[in-house]
Image: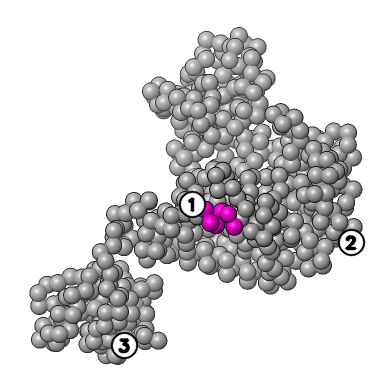
């Protein structure tokens, strides 16, 4: 070892000891007769000192010759500081330098390697190896490590076995776009990178492994955003001889364990909500339940009053923005413009103020009597000072629009505190959704999800009414995990493929291996996968997952540090059997 201690561990108990440290120069302060240098490693910072009349001229000159980010090996004696720094763990001591060795000089970095840096996102991404030296980024990766370690500890103690599954697999038509990999030895044929290990973990259940998990890299060729990367990590789990309730109990236990170990939070029992209620009361299958502001449907109170915007709508629905009756007309107009943005898509917004003096004011006053308005306020259990915001239109569309408005109002009212956590199970999703464009059914989760047992009779007569034996875990309005009870019988899986528009030949070509496995004693099984990066960002209290990934891609899917993706040579293309002229 080149060092006896790290830069974060020296204390008063080490005074008068001779120690050796290694690290990077954070900053220097030269006062002529005295010179201080902050030496940093991943564990902390130690202040070095040399002093004329105490230190040799050679040591002083050597230390004066170092710059930011030089890599040093320093030997010296630990001294108690006269002016202590209570903001540093090592602030009670300093190291009087007696020997210095420059292990490697460094160019001046393109941005400050400090907690508050002057580097922009793109610059820091280009020099990610420098950005990783900064405490805020390092702490995010330490949090990621802690969550991973706690996950493995919990699952290991529950008799799960971690099994690696292949990365080069077969492309499938369901789900997002695959990343494809050409095969040199089988020219004209391609592997795909897995979007999840779904079929392999089901095969492990057929193999009798009983309880499987894997913290696994997955790949999706999708458009990117703050919580999405082309390669991401899942906590992937599967269990045999279980029903839905067993999965919910087991993995609610995992989440409770993570909150306790990582955040020291004793999580209450996780409530459950049907998909139909989530859509009716929140307009989303991943509602943010840190705050109420539930939807109230108003058709019976507001239609047939001569107000065409409401009369012609399939659904009129609203929320109570508590305490917002003080909004000025200008503020309401800005909010109306906000909901009319393309990202939300509403045609307008109707408001009803319940003023502090008990009077009311609405943008549709001429169509509604005081009794009408009082009935609306009662529907919301509104209090003086509240304001009702209403949208109307086609049912599914207007619910999604009001969801966006609800979240925006929650943000404006300070109700979406990142340090507050609201965990929820959402259950009983539709098994299928019909796509008008392709004129066929699509699996809402994936083709291997089982119908709820009580809906099994509807699979032939009314497939659109069938609910999936599926479940999602939602934290603060973000889906962090999802799974289902799986189909494990070949006839039902064949029926599912029929509903999804697969010909028998297509089903055999894509999933024949799984169908064949079901004929050799497949057990009932179920599973779930958690978005590991998303969990990390939620626990870290930030929206973006990027800083919780050591070497992330930018919003264009590029790694600007290594300049990837990049072109390959014509020779390589030829070896792969790819037409160079194409």
Identify the residue position indicated by label 3 in the image.
Answer: 19
Label 3 or label 1, whichever comes before in sequence order: 3
At numbered mark 1, what does the secondary structure look like: helix, strand or loop? loop
Q: Is residue 487 magenta?
A: no
In depth, the one of 253 and 67 nearer the eye is 67
In the rendered image, residue 219, in percent from the top left (x then y), is placed at 60, 53
At numbered mark 3, what does the secondary structure look like: helix, strand or loop? strand
Position of residue 27 in the picture relative to residue 346 (left or right): left
In the rendered image, residue 129, in percent from the top left (x then y), is placed at 39, 64
Residue ID at (61%, 55%): 576
Q: Which residues are magenta?
A: 570-575
How crowded pointer 1 is (Cα within 10 Å; few <14, some 14-19, many 20+) is rated as: few
In depth, the one of 477 and 86 nearer the eye is 477
Identify the residue position indicated by label 1 in the image.
Answer: 567
Residue ID at (30%, 76%): 104
Q: Of the numbered discs in the image, which one, if any, rests on residue 521?
A: 2
> Please, is residue 193 above or below residue 462 in the view?
below
> Please, is residue 310 above or below residue 229 in the view?
above
How crowded pointer 3 is (Cα within 10 Å; few <14, some 14-19, many 20+) is rated as: some
In the rendered image, residue 121, in percent from the top left (x then y), is placed at 37, 51
> Please, is residue 391 above or below residue 517 in the view?
above
Label 2 or label 3, whichever comes before in sequence order: 3
């Amino acid at each position: 070892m080149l060092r006896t201690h790290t830069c974060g561990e020296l204390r008063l108990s080490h005074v008068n000891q001779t120690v050796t440290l290694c690290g990077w120069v954070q900053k220097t302060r030269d006062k002529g007769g005295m010179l201080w240098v902050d030496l940093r490693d991943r564990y902390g910072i130690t202040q070095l000192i040399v002093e004329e009349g105490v230190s040799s001229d050679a040591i002083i000159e050597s230390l004066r010759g170092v710059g930011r980010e030089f890599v040093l090996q320093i030997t010296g004696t630990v001294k108690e500081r006269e002016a202590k720094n209570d903001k540093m763990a090592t602030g009670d001591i300093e190291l009087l330098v007696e020997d210095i060795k420059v292990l490697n000089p460094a160019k001046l970095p393109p941005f400050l390697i400090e907690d508050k840096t002057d580097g922009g996102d793109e610059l820091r991404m280009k020099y990610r190896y420098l950005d990783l030296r900064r405490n805020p980024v390092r702490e995010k990766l330490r949090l990621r490590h802690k969550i991973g370690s706690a996950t493995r500890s919990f699952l290991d103690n529950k008799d799960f076995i971690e099994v690696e599954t292949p990365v080069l697999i077969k492309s499938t038509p369901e789900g997002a776009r695959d990343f494809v990999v050409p095969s040199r030895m089988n020219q004209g044929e391609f592997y795909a990178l897995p979007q999840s290990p779904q079929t392999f973990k089901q095969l492990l259940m057929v193999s009798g492994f009983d309880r499987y998990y894997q913290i696994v890299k997955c790949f999706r060729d999708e458009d990117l955003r703050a919580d999405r990367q082309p390669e991401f990590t899942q906590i992937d789990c599967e269990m045999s001889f279980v029903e839905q309730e067993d999965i919910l109990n087991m993995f609610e236990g995992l989440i409770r364990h993570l909150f306790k170990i990582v955040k020291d939070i004793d999580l209450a029992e996780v409530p459950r909500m049907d998909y139909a209620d989530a859509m009716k009361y929140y307009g989303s299958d991943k509602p943010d339940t840190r705050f109420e502001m539930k939807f109230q449907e108003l058709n019976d109170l507001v239609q047939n009053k001569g107000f065409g915007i409401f009369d012609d709508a399939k659904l009129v629905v609203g929320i109570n923005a508590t305490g917002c009756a003080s909004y000025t007309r200008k503020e309401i107009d800005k909010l109306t413009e906000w909901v009319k943005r393309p990202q939300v898509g509403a045609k307008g917004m109707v408001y009803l103020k319940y003023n502090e003096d008990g009077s009311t004011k609405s943008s549709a006053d001429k169509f509604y009597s005081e009794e009408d308005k009082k009935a609306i306020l009662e529907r919301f259990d509104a209090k003086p000072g509240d304001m009702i915001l209403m949208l109307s239109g086609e049912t599914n569309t207007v619910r999604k629009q009001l969801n966006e408005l609800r979240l925006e109002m929650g943000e404006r009212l300070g109700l979406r505190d990142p340090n507050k956590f609201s965990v929820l199970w959402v259950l009983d999703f539709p098994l299928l959704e019909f796509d008008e464009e392709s004129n066929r059914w699509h699996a809402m989760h994936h083709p291997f999800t089982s119908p709820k047992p009580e809906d099994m009779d509807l699979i032939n007569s009314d497939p659109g009414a069938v609910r999936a034996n599926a479940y999602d875990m939602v934290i603060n309005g973000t889906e962090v995990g999802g799974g289902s009870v799986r189909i494990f019988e070949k006839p039902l899986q064949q029926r599912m493929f029929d509903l999804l528009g697969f010909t028998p030949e297509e089903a055999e070509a894509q999933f024949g291996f799984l169908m064949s496995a079901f004929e050799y004693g497949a057990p009932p099984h179920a599973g779930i996968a958690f978005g590991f990066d998303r969990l990390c960002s939620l626990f870290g209290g930030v929206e973006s997952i990027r800083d919780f990934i050591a070497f992330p891609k930018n919003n264009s899917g590029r790694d600007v540090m290594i300049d990837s993706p990049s072109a390959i040579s014509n020779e390589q293309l030829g070896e792969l059997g790819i037409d160079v002229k194409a």
